[in-house]
Image: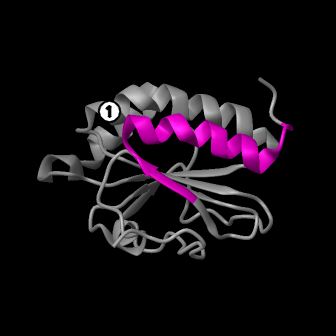
Amino acid sequence: MPMRLGTPFPGLDGATQWIGADGPPAFEAGKPILVHFWAVSCHICHETLPDLLAYRDRFVPLGLQLVSVHMPRQEADTDVQKVLQDVEEYGIHHAVAVDNEHRIADAYENQYVPAFFLFDREGKLKFRAAGDRGLQNVEKKLEELFSGSAQT
């Protein structure tokens, strides 16, 4: 059963490794959090990364806290070198959790990539979606959370 709207932020414990961080980020209370699940073998993940990174560049200065979780879909995806190559190639300069044991994915009741979990200022799940169509709605939900403070 997927995580229900209104569920409290479950944290990010269980990563097998962190890229761009020494561990789970220390999120500031009162600021929204976007958790993005992806995999190196996922074609749609690669196609949607530029949009996600544009949202990062637009909304992080306004207070959005962003973390990506690499969730392997197959054995070859557990190769951290491939994850590091994608992080470099796509310019992912925010924290990335490597979830090779699916402990974070399990906490989010997530089995899809790409997947997006947006938590509001109170730390409650406001929106969740998967796939490229799900990403299309992330911007709208971010705009709602930041109510006009985002520059278009």
Q: Position of residue 29 (x, y in %)?
A: 78, 69
Q: Position of residue 45 (x, y in %)?
A: 36, 36
In this figure, what is the number of numbered marks? 1
Q: Residue furthest right?
A: 149
> Would residue 5 be found to the left or right of residue 71 on screen?
right
> Would residue 4 be found to the left or right of residue 42 on screen?
right
Quarter placement of the C terminus: top right
* Image position of 38 with respect to 89: above or below: below
* Image position of 143 with respect to 126: above or below: above
Is residue 63 in sight in this rendering? no
Kindly report the secondary structure that dominates the magenta region of the rendered protein: helix
User: Is residue 142 shown in magenta?
Assistant: yes
Q: Position of residue 111 (x, y in %)?
A: 29, 60
Judging by the rendered image, the residue that carries numbered circle 1 is 44
- Tell me the magenta residue range: 127-149
- Which residue is painted at 83% across and 44% down in the image? 147
> Would residue 35 be found to the left or right of residue 104 on screen?
right
* Image position of 113 with respect to 111: above or below: above
Q: Position of residue 43 (x, y in %)?
A: 27, 31
In depth, the one of 62 and 118 nearer the eye is 118
- Which residue is painted at 67% across and 66% down in the image? 26
* Image position of 76 with respect to 47: above or below: below
Q: Which secondary structure, mark 1?
A: helix
Asked which colour scheme the image uses, the reply is one colour
Q: Sort mark 1 into few (<14), some (14-19) or many (20+) by Cα contacts within 10 Å.
A: some
- Which residue is painted at 61% across and 28% down in the image? 54
> Would residue 88 be found to the left or right of residue 105 on screen?
right
Q: Residue furthest left?
A: 75
Q: Amino acid at mark 1?
A: Ile
